Image: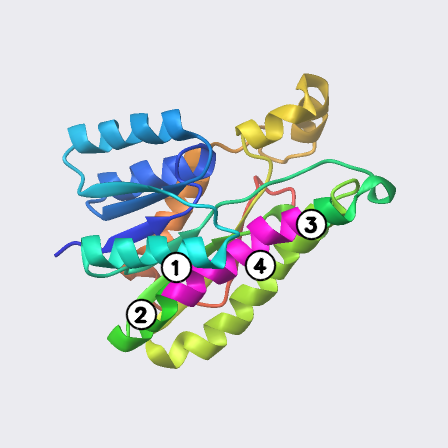
Amino acid sequence: MNDTVVITGGSRGIGRAAVKAFAAAGYRVAVIYKNAEKQAEELAEELKAGGTDSEIYRCDVSSYSETGLVCKKILERFGRADILVNNAGISQIKLFTDITEQDWDDMFAVNMKGTFNFCSWLIPHMISRKSGNIINISSMWGVEGASCEVHYSASKAAVIGFTKALAKELGPSGINVNCVAPGFIDTDMNKELGGEAAKMFIDEVPLQRAGSVEDIANVIVFLASKGAKYITGQVINVNGGIV
């Protein structure tokens, strides 16, 4: 039986690329989305046409109870969850003095609590099988910090700390936990920067280009592979050399 991967935020951007990469590698795929229903349905049709054993689920990752119901459905449908990719995330560019309490809470609810929620429901299943792989998606700003993105940077830094601690705790149970920290990637999330701002940023990247979603997806799939079995507790920076 092929391994099953659960990918949050799987309908767009990095998540969608990861879904396609895992499908191409022969995995069974559970795709989690929230708002991009049309893109999720199109992806489901594409996966079905390609012969991938897959299912899509709508879920607000910030809700502990909703996440629990979805994880139960996934385990009933596939029988197991071998790999969890916590990719769902939101961002916002704002001066610190303009960040509201709601802005702060929303950022951590999705970027950090969403990761906690899916881990909480699926880790007991992995522990009982003495096997599993968790890949959390942070950001270069979780490593470096970004002006005008304090709440985003803080939430992504929390994901890094969460990853390192969880890797130490789950290692004896045969579970790998790693983190990918993307740099400037060509996604909808970064389109709000605008053309000139994006160009200025890319000029600072040694490889002189924005990263593609496939650049990140390839690393995620590698971390889930047998070739990465002795890698855990690590932050893999994929940023064209800027960090």
Crowd rating for badge 2 (residues with CA inside 10 Å; few <14, some 14–19, many 20+): many
Residue 173 found in image quarter: bottom left
Please tell me whether mark 1 or mark 3 is closer to you in this view.
1
Q: Which residue is mark 3?
A: 153
- At label 3, the amino acid type is Ser
Q: Which residue is mark 4?
A: 159
Residue 189 found in image quarter: top right
Q: CA distance from mark 1 to mark 3?
A: 27 Å
Regarding residue 84, the answer to whether it shows in the image is yes
Q: CA distance from mark 1 to mark 2?
A: 15 Å
Q: Residue at x 52, y 33 (%)?
A: 211
Q: Residue at x 37, y 69 (%)?
A: 123
Q: Which residue is mark 2?
A: 126
What x and y, as percent, mark residue 183?
Answer: 59, 41
Q: Which residues are magenta?
A: 105-121
What x and y, as percent, mark residue 176?
Answer: 39, 67
What x and y, as percent, mark residue 238?
Answer: 53, 45
- Say if 86 sits above or below 95 in the image: below
Q: CA distance from mark 3 to mark 4?
A: 10 Å
Q: Residue at x 44, y 58 (%)?
A: 65
Q: Which residue is mark 1?
A: 68
Regarding residue 231, the answer to whether it shows in the image is no
